[in-house]
Each structure stands twice: as C-alpha cells, then as structure tokens.
Image (spheres, rainbow, N blue to C red):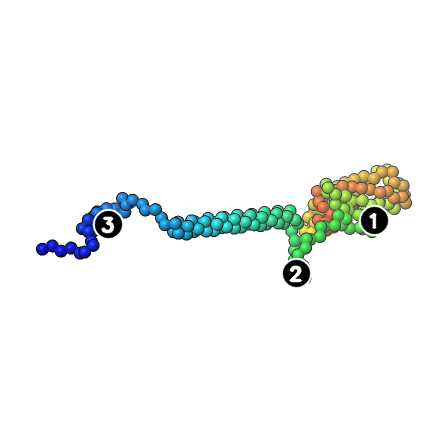
Amino acid sequence: MSTSLPGVCLAEASSAPEAPAEGLRLEELEPEPLGDLFAIKLLEKIIELEDALRYLASEVGEMNERLTKKMDDLEEKVAKLEKAPPGYVSGSGKSSAPKPPPKKRFEVGDVYLGSGFHGHAIIYETTDEGTKFSGEIKNDSSAPAEKVEFEIVAYDENDKVIGVKAFNIEDLEVGESTSFDVLVKGPQAHWIVRHEIAFLRGS
C-alpha cells in the first residue's frame, strides 16, 4: 500500500538539483556570474594595488635621480682634487697647499771673481728655460779690459754641477762697472744651493 504526503506532488520532488557527475574536472565547470558586491570589492582591491605600484615606481624614480645627482657631485669633487696641487696638513690640522718655490733665489753682495774683477748685487731667478743670473761686474784690476770671459757654475744640494754657462764682457775701463744677464739653461733657481762666477781669461 503506497502512501503520499498531503499537498506534495511526486513531480515536484523529482525536480531537485542533481549532484555533479563523478569524474568532472574543475576546468570543465561552467563559470557562474559573480555577485555584484563581490565584484565591487575585487575592483577596489585592484585599484588599491595599482595605486601602490604607481607610488613605488615614483619613489624608485626619485631615489635613482637623487643617487645620480650625488654621483655627479662626487665625480666633480674628485676631478677638482685631481687638478689641485698636493696638500699637506699643518700643525693646526688644517690642510693647505705648499707654497711654490720662490722665483728669485738669492741676492749676493760683493764677490771676488778673480784677476781684479768683482761682482756686485748678483741675483738669480727662475725663468721658463732655466735660471737667469744678473748683476754687475767691476774692473778693479790695473789695466782696461778689451774682452774678458767668465763662467757661471751652479751646484745642487749634493754639490753636483747642474748648470754651466760661459759669458763675455768687453771694453771695461779700470774702475768701471757693466751689467750682465746670463741664462743657465736647465736648473730652476730653488734647485741651486750654491754657485760660482769665476774669471777664465781676458785680454
């Protein structure tokens, strides 16, 4: 004897959703449309991520720009240091460049040159080609000089000859003086520790 519930049709009971068939894979399922609320939340999250990426990109760009500027500044400072003269640290701890050697090294008083001739106010100074000696030579001998030859010899701190130059003076009466300018090629004035100007021969 069959029984049925009052008000319930057998056809309605048979229309309930069926379970998915066995062996059906995930990718074979038909996509279902997302709910409106879920779609809005997902879109907001994507926008937040895009904003975050834009911010990071701008920060990285500014960091690269600052780093590039610092590198350029550092290279400029290094270039200036390479062009500057070498410095030393003084007793006060301050760095300063050494003073350049003086162009005019010495001024010599009266010097006996031999055979009755004397040199006066002899100065030697650095030039582009070497050291220029200048001063006066006086004839204190007993006879006038038609032509007299002298020689300049320059020595360094090791007493080594670093420059030699012969020169002449002419027509110098007794008691008279004449000026001279002689270039000794090669050495600079601050290399010369001592020098000699000596009479060689005369007529």
Q: Quadrant of the C terminus?
A: top right
Tag 1: residue type? Ala
Dot 3: what SS? Answer: loop
Instruction: Decide: is 173 above or below 66.
Output: above
Look at mark 2 in the image and give the residue it sits on. Answer: 93
Q: Is residue 22 left or right of residue 151?
A: left
Marks 2, 3: nearer the viewer: 3
Q: Can residue 60 be seen in this view?
A: no
The foreground one among 61 and 202 is 61
Is residue 9 or residue 188 the one in the foreground?
9
Distance in Å between CA atoms under marks 1 and 2: 41 Å
Mark carried by residue 17: 3
Report which residue position mark 1 lands on.
121
- Under mark 2, the amino acid is Gly
Mark 3 is surrounded, within 10 Å at the Cα level, by few (under 14), some (14 to 19) or many (20 or more) other residues, namely: few
- Please say whether residue 54 is visible from this viewpoint: yes
Q: Residue at x 85, y 38 (%)?
A: 170
The reply, left or right, for residue 31 in relation to residue 46 is: left
